[in-house]
Amino acid sequence: MGTFTDRRAGYARTEQRLRDQQRRMAEVRATAESEDELISATVGGHGELVELRLDPRVFRVPDSAGLARAITGTIHRAAELAQEEGFAIIEEHFPAETTAATADLRLGPVLHELDRRIAGGER
């Protein structure tokens, strides 16, 4: 088991790697299209909608419920793609059996704990 200084340096290296990965995840953009290619949704690394494109032809058939379902489904697919891309960035930190669908990619709590340990608040 290393000295406190060694552990602290290890935590600092891990924190820096996680912060770099967090920055890369913030740059993730994933786009999905509806089956008819009339709807395109782009989301960021945390699944937030960044851009929504609607081809004017979607308004030819006045079906607001169908349009809403198609938009929602397209956004969800884009979010799944973003989750997969984000998971690929940080999967080294998860157990082998973890998948993109089951991983929580929020790094804030992990970084908070590392900050606490670096400051000397080791458990």
Image (cartoon, rainbow, N blue to C red):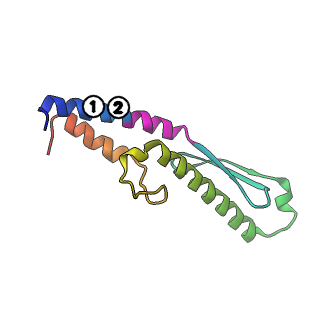
Name the one closer to the observer, 84 or 57: 84
- On the image, which quarter does residue 38 sit in? bottom right
Q: Which mark is residue 85?
A: none
Q: Residue at x 54, y 37 (%)?
A: 27
- On the image, which quarter does residue 19 sit in? top left
Q: Amino acid at mark 1?
A: Ala
Q: Position of residue 79 (x, y in %)?
A: 58, 54
Q: Residue at x 18, y 34 (%)?
A: 7
Q: Position of residue 28 (x, y in %)?
A: 56, 41
Q: Is residue 122 left or right of residue 33?
A: left
Q: What residue occupies the far front of the structure in this picture?
A: 96
Query: Mark 1 highlights which residue?
Result: 12
Is residue 86 shown above or below 14? below
**Region rendered in magenta:** 18-28
Is residue 12 shown above or below 52? above
Q: Position of residue 117 (x, y in %)?
A: 20, 38
For residue 101: magenta?
Answer: no
Query: Mark 2 highlights which residue?
Result: 16
Q: Is residue 64 left or right of residue 82?
A: right
Q: Amino acid at mark 2?
A: Gln
Name the one closer to the observer, 62 or 81: 81
